[in-house]
Amino acid sequence: MSKAEILEALRQHPFTHHMDEAWKESLAEMARLQTYAPDTLLLREGRAADAFFLIIDGIVAIEMFIPQRGPVRLQTVSAGEIVGWSWALPPYRWEFDARALVETRAVVLDAAALRARMSQDCALAAWILSRLLSVVAGRLKATRLQLLDIYALPEGRLA
Amino acid sequence: MIAATGPEAPVAVEQDLFTPLPFQVTAVRRETADTFTLRLRPPDGRPFSFRPGQFNMLYVFGVGEVAISISGVHPRTHDLEHTVRAVGYVTRALVRLHRGDMVGVRGPYGRGWPVEEARGRDVLIIAGGIGLAPLRPALRHLMVHRSNYERIVLLYGARTPRDLLYRLELERWRGRFDLHTFVTVDRGDEAWRGHIGVVTTLLPLAERLLDLRHAFVMMCGPEIMMRVAARELENRGVPPDQVFVSLERNMKCGVAMCGHCQLGPLFICQDGPVFPLSQVYTFMETREF
Amino acid sequence: MASLESAIPTPGQAWRMEKARLQELLDALNRQGYTVIGPRIREGAIVYDELQRLTDLPIGWTDEQEKGYYRLKRREDEAYFGFAVGPHSWKQFLHPPVFLLGRARRNGQGFEWIPPTDPPPRYAFLGVRACELHAIAILDRVFMGGPYVDPVYRARREAVFLIAVQCTVAGGTCFCASMGTGPKAPPGADLVLTELPDAFVVEIGTERGAAVMAGIPCAPATEADRAAVEARLEETARAMGRRLDTTDLPALLYRNLEHPRWEEVAQRCLTCGNCTMVCPTCFCFTVEDASDLSGTQAERVRRWDSCFTTAFTYTAGHPIRQSAKARYRQWLTHKLASWWDQFGTSGCVGCGRCITWCPVGIDLTEEVHAIRQTDGTIAGERR
């Protein structure tokens, strides 16, 4: 896994579209490429949020483990999207599980290094946080639509 | 007095306008808990001619008539196929029919999907729930005339894995190298290894495969889904005259006379049910319009 | 001018006919197999029904109309047509309120469809007002102007004989003058009558009209007669009880779909649908199915419907227009805005029936005026 490969993977990912080239290079310094076998966890509820995942390929499920029911899948994240934002918010702890459903490849950024870099470079921090905000907003919108249960039959019908 | 308005204009069938033709039910296939596909054989046995996206008025003896989109023609028998979700009294009566029963058919009516206009373009199909039914003939048309189109992507969302329509065909579509099929459900189950989330969450995947700004988008599903997807597409720079939606309203005649299916200036039965988004977006956003 | 003896009525001519000779016109129409329908008094209102004799007409009567108000009153003269329009319109004869589309009879697992066989009636309408001629022309576009033609409407419409009567009285809720639909009759009638104190001036509209008039002795109308007709029409136009400013009306309504006025009118509207029933152009219908107890015979009946019912938009288990606001807005914007897009004409002819027969006195001219005064206001969302 060469630095060039990592940089290229970062460049290809939609999260970094329109990002300053110098920033991409500095992100590549703190990144690794990782492949997750089906069913492995990328992150787990309660653990330290020490990484930021840019999914290159595969499907990742956001899950929550419920006693007596096991892991319940709430949403999936696909190629071109990101997983995890708890690394950006104190106390830097994961709130959910994230599991690869199929073989999944990701650029994994070291969260501690990224936070340190962002604390020194406000412009980079603003850029990343605003991107994260739009991801969070999109995820929230999708969740709300899921709550609406739009395919269900209307209740109280007379026909 | 009876003037055709263009090559798309249907031919007037005056005296027979309100006379249902008896079609025989040759099969009733269960798709999901409340959705069934009826196969209907025309009285003369000849293949039923229609354009993808058009609908028929289906009459159940003594119960009533309902507008149902045509979901295909059986490849071998050429029987007409209608996928019906049992939500009202006529649709419930339809799905209770058996092989050998008769259904009255008037149609086909309305304007269909822009399969000709989309030639030479990328095509994105977005289906939600039973919205896949009116899109199936369009997709089949695209696949039969595959070389006329560039990349084709199907995004299909359903409530749960058990609510997916046309499972066998869906599997075949997923297996094709010249069609990208993505399926998502709102709620997964143990066995489901695919996407979970509303159908709009699949848009980033489609965006990686085709150039949305030049693609033709054909969309059908719950109105709320289409409204949200329309906004997402707009945000991605898709011109609204390249996005087509199929709308649903109460219909009593199918020929723009009973007044029920009006949406502002439009009669959904005659001017639609397929519309360019640019023509209907304002009305879709106007509440209770 | 041709002499009385040699003159044969031809389209475009005007004749002066003694009032009592109207009976001869009725007889001539009856002989030709027409059922003559015209105004007569029933249950305190002037309605349209079958006429046998001239004396069936409301001679010497008039009507007082205001919003939510209608009363018959004696006139001081014996005018034949000294009133405005009542709760009926000709729509009910051309587009029957209830019509059997056909029967289905079960045979084995299938059924046999039996279409209606009764020959359509041949009507002669006596006393069609200018606004009503416009209304019929509008229904023509609805039922016969599209890619499909309604066989029910067409059979009645093509057989009908039209005798217009130009209004010499304006009703309290009339506003045809501002709609450009009266009081002068547009072309289209077989005969056009105007009542003068001592005679009718009869304008021949069609060959058919000329043929009926040929057997009735009358004299060519004089210049004075023609001038009297014009003067009466001008006077009627001036006496209109209401007016509607139609300037840019469709655009005004389309850009005010979220105007708070819809909510205000909905507070008063009972969504009874009276306005749609009395409207001479409201055409919506539903189709109802019924089967006998043994399940061997079924009927399909087409029946007038109204966009004021919630069932009207019942789609996949739910009505789309649930609130009264949405239903009133649909009706008004259809009449005055979307009708133009659909049929190239207004859906309103200014007859004023919807104002008179609204039980709570909602007046569409007032509603439009209110929106125009506060154009662009957006309603606060409250539910």
Image: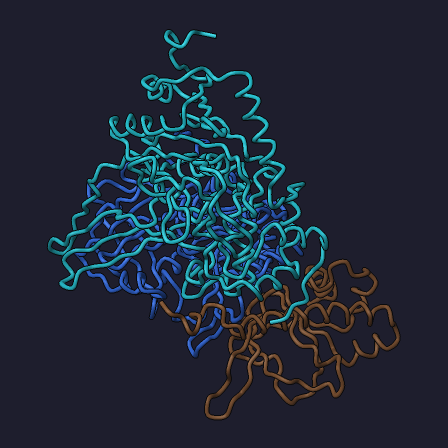
- Position above or below: C150 against B105: above
The chain assigned the colour brown in the figure is A
Count of numbered marks: 0
Locate the C terminus of chain B by quadrant.
Answer: bottom right
Percent from the top left, x then y, of residue C140?
42, 35
Q: Colour of chain B?
A: blue
Residue at 68% x, 72% y: name it.
Answer: A136
Nearest to the observer: residue B21 or residue C233: C233
Give residue B175's quadrant in the image.
bottom left
Nearest to the observer: residue C267 or residue C235: C235
Residue at 34% x, 35% y: name it.
Answer: C54
Instruction: Confirm whether residue C155 shows in the render.
Output: no
The chain assigned the colour cyan in the figure is C
- Position above or below: C196 against B50: above
Instruction: Confirm whether residue C325 shows in the render.
Output: yes
- Position above or below: B19 against B188: above
- Position above or below: A140 against B71: below
Residue at 54% x, 44% y: name it.
Answer: C171
**Colour basis:** by chain
Percent from the top left, x then y, of residue C14?
46, 18
Nearest to the observer: residue A109 or residue B114: B114
Nearest to the observer: residue B134 or residue A124: B134
Locate residue B201 relative to residue B128 in the image: left or right: right
Locate residue C304 relative to residue C174 in the image: left or right: left
Percent from the top left, x then y, of residue B284?
56, 56
Locate the N terminus of chain B by quadrant.
Answer: top left
Percent from the top left, x then y, of residue A13?
68, 62
